[in-house]
Structures are given as C-alpha cells and as structure tokens.
Image (cartoon, coloured by chain):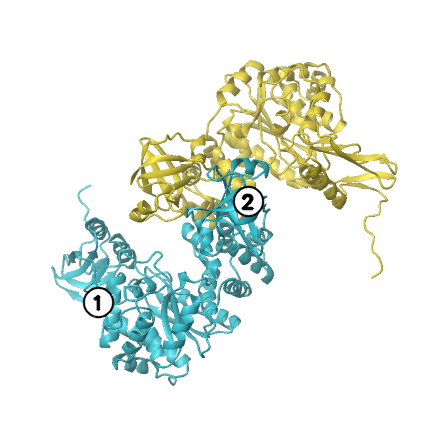
Chain colours: A yellow, B cyan
C-alpha cells in the first residue's frame, strides 16, 4: 500500500510502524508483522503496530527510525509486507552446528543493520553462537562484515595506532594517559571508547567530564589530523552498527560469546583504520577474564584475527585483581588521570600500567627501540609532554585546556568506611566496588563514585579510613552505604568474616 | 514513580508502556527497558517507549495489555524499573547443556506468562531447546507449568476424551467427524482446535463457517455438559498461555523443538482435563513428520509424557502423503465434512480415517470392545446418529442446525486445471496445495480453497479436470493460478517434467 509518513513522537527502542486499523485489515497486516517502508532508494524495515492515532492512508514511524534514516512528514512511501528474511536459514544452520560461509555471515549482518532481523532472530543468533561458537574464518568474516556495513574513518597518516582494554576492572582510566603519551611521541592514535554498560565509568564517561566526546567522523578526522589523537565516544558514530544492535541481546541474556566479542572489538578498530592494535586483557578475580590461561587463549585469537584483517596486534595481559589507581567514578577518575598527566606522578598501579602499555605502542609504532618503550613513555609523562599533548586534545575536543584537576566537582554527599580491625588488606572486591559506585549514582551522576585509601597488601590500623563513597544525592548515598555494609568490599587479614551463634 | 493510566489506541503485539520524556529522564528509564506496572494485587510487565503523547504523571499502556489485564483510564499505578529476571539464569543453564530442575522450568514459564521475559529471552530459550533439547522429566515439568499458569476446565463428567492431529496434511477435516461420532456414543469430548497458522484451514476455521467457535471456559463447560462435546477455538481461551507466546519465536525462526511441541499439545489437553487422548500423526512427504520411524519415536514420547501427566495416551500413525478428502479451504471443507456426516458417505480417505480414529476412542473410552471400535464408529456415522449429535453441537454453538452443506457459500471466482497428459496420478504435493489455497485467500477468505477431482493412484485422460481453485477476489485467484502453474501440484505418470533445449 501507498501511505503518507507521519513522524510520531515516540522512541520505542525499535523501528515501530503505526498503521491505521482499517488499512491494516485490508493489507492483512497484524501487530508485530515485519514491513518494508520504501521511498525511491530509501528503505527501512519496521514492526507493525495497529492504531487509529494515524488516519487511513497514513503510516506513522517512531523517531528511532530518524537517527539513521531520513524521512519527512507527509512524504509518500510504499508499505510492503516482508516475509521471513533469507538469513534466518543461516541462523538455523548455526543452530544445527554447521559452519557458516562468508556470504551467509554477510547476509546476517546486512539484515541486522537493515533491521530485517529483529529481537527474536538476533537473540537466536547470539544464543546459537554462545552454544556452538564460531571458528576463525567465521570470526574474520563477521568482523569485516560488521565494519563494512557501517561508516569507516580514513585518515591520511601512518601508522595508525590503537589500544583497547577488555572491560571489568574498576577505575581503569589508564588509556587517558596512554593516548597523549603515544601521540606526544608523534604517533597517530584515534581512540574511541564506550560508555559504561555494567561498569561505573567507561573511558568516554570520564573524558566527558572535561571535554566533549560526541563528534561526527568528519570532525574526528579533523581533530586527529590536527593533534594526532582523540579520546571520543564510539557510540556517537555509526561504526559497526550491527554490534550496537546485537549487544542488546547479549546484555539481556548476560552472555558474551567469544567470537562475537572479538568481532565487536576488532570491527571498530578496523573501521577506524587502525593498523597497530594493542589489546589489554586485565586478568584476575571479578573481571571478565579471570585466569591467565583464558587470557592467553584469548590473546592468541586476537593476534590471529588481526592477521586476517591485515592488522598487527599485540596483547598485554595485565593485573586486574583490584581497581586501578585510587578512584572509581567519572569525575573522581578524571581528577586522578589529569593529575597524573599534569604532575607525572600518581598511584603506582596507574602509572606503571599506563607507561607499560604506552611503551609497547611506542615500540610497535617504531619510535622506540625494542625494550626501551616503557622508559620513553615514562620520560614523556614526567617531562610534561604528555600533559601538553593532552591539553591540545582537550582543546580540540571543546574542553578547557587550563582545567585544574582538583577543581573538577565531585559528589559532596560522602561517607567514609574505616577499618574494623588492624591487619593487611588481603582483597578488594572488584564487583562490589563497581556495584557500590553505581548505587551511588555513577556513571549518570558524574560526581558519584568511590575514593580508595588502601590497596591490596597495605597495612592498616583499626579506625584507619578505607574508602569514601561520593554521591550527588543523599538517597543514592544511603543506597550505596547499605550495599557497602552488605558486601564489605575491602577485606583485612584477621577480620572476622562470619559470626555464627548457637544453633 | 506513581502515574495515572492512559489507555492508548494501539496494538503493538507486545505490552508497550509509554512514558513522558521528562518523567523517564527523572526515573532513568530508557526505550525498551522492562518496567512493572502495579496497582494493588494487579501487576504486569511491559516495555518502555518514551513519548510526549502522554503527559507528565501519566503512563500509557497499549491495548494488548487489556486482553488479559484489567486497567482503567485514570487509575493510579506504580511504575517500577525491573531488573534482569531470575529465570534468565536458567535459560543460560540450558544454553550450557545442563538439565533444568522443575522449579527452574516453572520460573521460566511463569516469567513468560507474566511478560517478564520478552522476545530476546524467549527466543534464546527456544533456540537453546532446539539445540540442546529437553528430557522427559523436563518436558513433563514444562507441560504442567504451561497448563497451570493458564485457565483450566473442570467438567463433572468421566471419562473425558480428546483427539489431536499433528498438523501438516491439507484438507484434514477428520476431527469434525470424529467428535460427533464419539459424543453420539455417550462419551464426553471437549475438543479445542487451532486456527490455521501455516495451513489453509485449521479445524476452528472450518467449524466457524457454520457455528461460533469463540467461547469462554464457562460457556464451554455449559455446552459440553449439555451435549457432551464441542468444537471450539482454543485460542479464545487462556489455555497454556505461555505456549501462545513462545510459538511466536518458533514461527519467526521456523523451528519447532520436539520437547516444546509435546508440551504445547499436551498442556492444552491437560488444561481441558482430558483423561484419554488420541494423537494422530499424519506421516508422509510434505507433512511435519515425514517418516514412520520419526512418527514412532514421537509416539513413544507422547505415550510416556501422558503417563507422567496421569493421562492415557494412544497414537495413530496415519497416511498423510496427500490431502484428506477432496477439499482444502474453510468453506469447501465445511461442505465436505457436513455432507459426510449427513449422508454417512464421502471420500474414502476421510471416512476411513475418521471412523478409524473414532473407533480407537470408542475402545479407549470403554464403550466398544477391543477390535470393534471402527465398526461401531461406522454404524454411528451411517445411522445418522453422528449427524444428530453434530446438529446438537452446532445449535449449542449458536449455528443453524438445519444447515444444508451444499448451500454454504464458496468462492465464485474459479479456475480449473486439466490433465496435460493421460496416465496415473503419482503424487499430490501437500505443500504446493496448501500454498495455492493460501494464495487464493484461505483461511481469511472462507470461500477460498481447492477442490480436487483426483487422488493418488487414479487414472486420468488428457483434458480431464484435476482441480479447481476457488477464490473470493479475482486478484487472489490470479495469484493462485500463477503459483499452481509454477508448482504443478498434481503429478501424472508419463508427464514431461522438464524440457531442456539445446545448450
């Protein structure tokens, strides 16, 4: 049927297509049917809802559609019932344990991006991958298909460096130091990051405290060609859009099939044109990769996938058994990262990790002889060159280069936990720290988070402060305190862990 | 947050919850988030859409919610963000190949019915079942959970008989004869049927031509207590509602995991209080179960599952290699079924199958000695007693008991295909027959369908009529003709199947 577009004031998280009940009856359309909306060369797929909020001869589209597709009020379009997409056959093939061919994977990814596949089909695909896995041929095909169905950056500089940390360790502001160190050495590093999904602060959330992070690909090109680096939010770009869609199903099911994780990370690096990629795999209790064996196996996969993509990949397995540095939460982490860049000094866990990773990149990029990268990285940091570069990045991204870290506002509703006993700190629970910071309001409340006064191995005396919770709202502070009491995130040797009375 | 209900004129195929953008921002709600809507003891879960179609302090719900839940305009409710449902853990367990415990299956089914699980989670569950399967303990738990989370019929008669045909064979109006034969012998048989999903006519679509099929459970109780039988649409009832929800994912993926199929069928029988159940498994090319080995294995599963449910189950493996009788499509099938009941005569495939199945039920129900059921069934049919009972059923279901089969209107746009060559009919393609009847408008257009003049094994001469397509609209007739030309559903021995020219 032909119909005139009406743009509906609604964000539904899917492409909703409202059709008048009479029109739907004539066209034999039912709620949740898949239809194609077509006008000239433009075409999108959406899910039918029946409603007399639109008149006969009208078709309502939810605003979700407009993010990527340009339809205007009153425009005439064809509404065509769509059958089962061909790619469902390939999803079934994977269910039945068969290997998918390159063209089959491309068809699935194309149909995901075109919204021909919806929650049901995507979830089935993700579940089939969790159960039956993908081999390296399939992962490489998936990675390239994901990148090529989105926008890609083309920067006229060589080499292009990149760094990515697998998530899970709280307070990991490391890359905010790595990027300016590497760029200060003359290398190009267009770094995109994500916002927090399950953590208390993604790198993009932290940078956003002192600079803009949402830019178009053209703007990023200009920034990077000017200052050699950026620290932006990948989510504002149309990089590997299939990944943004499949991640919804992965999150709802709390699964993360390895093949999909590799494709997700590497498709974005591929789309950014990165040639030398360093992958940081924090390993330890309470992070995504708990054992070194797992980390090694994953490292081999990253390196092998890189080869298929024409990228040179190295992997750093790092210690992720407790938070990095002393802060968790956007504003607190921004303070700590900027202060380390400004003074060249900071918590050992942050400085050692940042200069370690930056050193590898300096060697990979050919500006430091083998074995001297870390030393050079430290010099760049301590000399203030990294801070100078960071100020350029901040300015290019619309922030104030004269920012003073200690003036960044943090949550003024605070509560400090103290040691109930004397002894050594034996463990800090990553998951509990993240949960408490989130309960306090992070990452939405930029000032919310946790300041840690001790790290594993340090000696404390009864009554010493262990950590302070910061919040912007009393109610959130209270929630965080309750959670902290229940989870006791910092364990001290000799502490009574459980007390059981007479039974 | 507290809000006032606004009922939105929208059927979206899901429970949509519209929230004002400002309210959503305050409550940190995002599109497609899961929320609980609560008022006193009432509670439903739905998916958030942001919209200023509702004001601040209002919450819009789509009409889908009202089918099963009673909310009124202006009613004050609480809107509470809902986290990941506990049952997602059990779905993951099944993904990882583990056996689910009874309570875990119950939690999944409960969450499906409560709409706590949505397309993503349900599709993942269905996919995991397709890959990893269910054992008989799991299937029994699933069946009972599905039945007990819906309404159940409680009829004060014994024994309660039931019959169910696994789908796939076109023209299968058999149970329209079986039910009155069995009831005429004094047994109780409250038969629920489905509408066509992928076929050209479900039993409910056919019966609807001459009687109402949508009744409440109370009305069914009254009908069955009066006349001993019914022929109603199961979909109008809240029987095993989890099945109606999971079937959507199965259909989109065109999968039908065995355990889920067993639970789907038997949960509805269990909910109807059936004690003696006959399962008809049509077997042959182009139906669901293609081989006798498959049918036997499925039969054993049905019988074993019946034991776990306290039901006595028998299975009839029947011939499903071509359509039953001579008609396909609601009105055409209604004519054929009623005429057979009225006259006691009809196509051999229909009469033999119907009296065969009815005979088994008469023996199961203890009214016919072993080995004599079919003879008794034939007598009941030929004596006119089955027709008398059918007239009672029609009257009880609001139809005209004096209906004349030949006066039932059928599609008057027709086209007849004739034999292009002389010879024996070697095959009739079930899938093609169904597709042509659907192209002609069945099941929505009651008068659309196919009349067959020949069956497999019959001899035809060139020019003899093979089948007539009936449609209500010229355009649909044309579509059906094109499809029939392309698929050639009736194959005659000696017919040129392909002609290939010089290459």
- Element under label 2? strand
User: Mark on residue B3?
Assistant: 2
Q: As rendered, which of A258 and A85 lies closer to the eye?
A: A85
Q: Are marks 1 and 2 in contact (CB under 8 Å)?
A: no
Q: Quadrant of the N terminus of chain B?
A: top right
* Residue B10 appearing in the image: yes
In the rendered structure, the residue with mark 1 lies on which chain? B
Front in this rendered view, residue A242 or B192: B192
Q: Quadrant of residue A17?
A: top left
Residue B399 position by quadrant: bottom left
What residue do we see at 53% from left, 46% from top?
B4
Q: Chain of mark 2?
A: B
Secondary structure at badge 1 equals: loop
The image shows residue B159 at horizontal and vertical percentages of 44, 79
Structural distance between the alpha carbons of marks 1 and 2: 69 Å
Task: Tell me residue B156's x, y (percent).
Answer: 46, 77
For mark 1, what is the residue?
B457
């Amino acid at each position: 049927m032909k119909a005139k577009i009406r743009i509906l004031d609604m964000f539904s998280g899917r492409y909703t297509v409202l059709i008048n009940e009479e029109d739907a009856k004539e066209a034999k359309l039912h709620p949740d049917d898949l239809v194609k909306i077509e006008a000239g060369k433009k075409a999108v797929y959406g899910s039918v809802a029946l409603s007399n909020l639109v008149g006969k001869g009208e078709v309502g589209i939810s605003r979700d559609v407009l993010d990527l597709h340009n339809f205007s009020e009153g425009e005439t379009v064809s509404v065509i019932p769509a059958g089962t997409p061909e790619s469902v056959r390939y999803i079934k093939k994977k269910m039945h344990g068969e290997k998918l061919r390159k063209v089959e994977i491309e068809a699935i990814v194309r149909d995901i991006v075109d919204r021909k596949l919806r929650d049901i089909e995507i979830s089935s695909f993700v579940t089939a991958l969790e159960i039956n896995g993908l081999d390296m041929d399939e992962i490489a095909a998936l990675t390239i298909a994901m990148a090529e169905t989105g926008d890609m950056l083309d920067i006229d500089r060589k080499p292009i460096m990149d760094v990515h940390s697998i998530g899970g360790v709280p307070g990991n502001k490391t890359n905010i130091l790595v990027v300016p160190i590497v760029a200060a050495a003359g290398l190009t590093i267009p770094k995109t990051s994500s916002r927090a999904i399950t953590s208390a602060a993604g790198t993009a959330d932290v940078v956003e405290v002192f600079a803009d992070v949402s830019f178009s690909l053209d703007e990023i090109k200009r920034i990077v060609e000017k200052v050699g680096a950026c620290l932006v939010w990948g989510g504002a770009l149309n990089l590997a859009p299939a990944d943004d869609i499949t991640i919804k199903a992965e999150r709802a099911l709390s699964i993360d099939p390895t093949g999909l994780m590799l494709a997700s990370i590497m498709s974005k690096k591929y789309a950014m044109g990165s040639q030398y990629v360093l992958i940081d795999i924090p390993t330890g209790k309470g992070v995504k990769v708990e054992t070194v064996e797992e980390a090694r196996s994953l490292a081999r996969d990253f390196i092998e996938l890189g080869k298929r993509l024409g990228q040179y990949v190295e992997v750093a397995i790092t210690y992720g058994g407790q938070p990095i540095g002393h802060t968790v939460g956007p504003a607190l982490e921004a303070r700590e990262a900027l202060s380390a860049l400004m003074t060249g000094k900071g918590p050992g866990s942050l400085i050692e990790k940042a200069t370690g990773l930056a050193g590898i990149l300096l060697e990979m990029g050919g500006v430091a002889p083998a074995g001297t990268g870390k030393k050079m990285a430290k010099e760049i940091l301590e000399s203030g060159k990294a801070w100078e570069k960071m100020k350029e990045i901040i300015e290019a991204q619309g922030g104030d280069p004269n920012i003073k870290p200690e003036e960044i506002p943090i949550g003024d509703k605070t509560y400090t936990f103290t040691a109930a006993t004397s002894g050594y700190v034996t463990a800090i629970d990553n998951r509990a720290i993240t949960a408490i910071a989130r309960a306090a309001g992070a990452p939405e409340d930029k000032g919310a988070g946790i300041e840690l006064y001790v790290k594993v191995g340090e000696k404390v005396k009864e009554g010493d402060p262990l950590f302070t919770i910061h919040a912007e709202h009393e109610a959130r502070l209270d929630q965080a305190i309750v959670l902290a009491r229940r989870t006791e995130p910092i364990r001290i040797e000799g502490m009574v862990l459980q007390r059981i009375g007479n039974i």
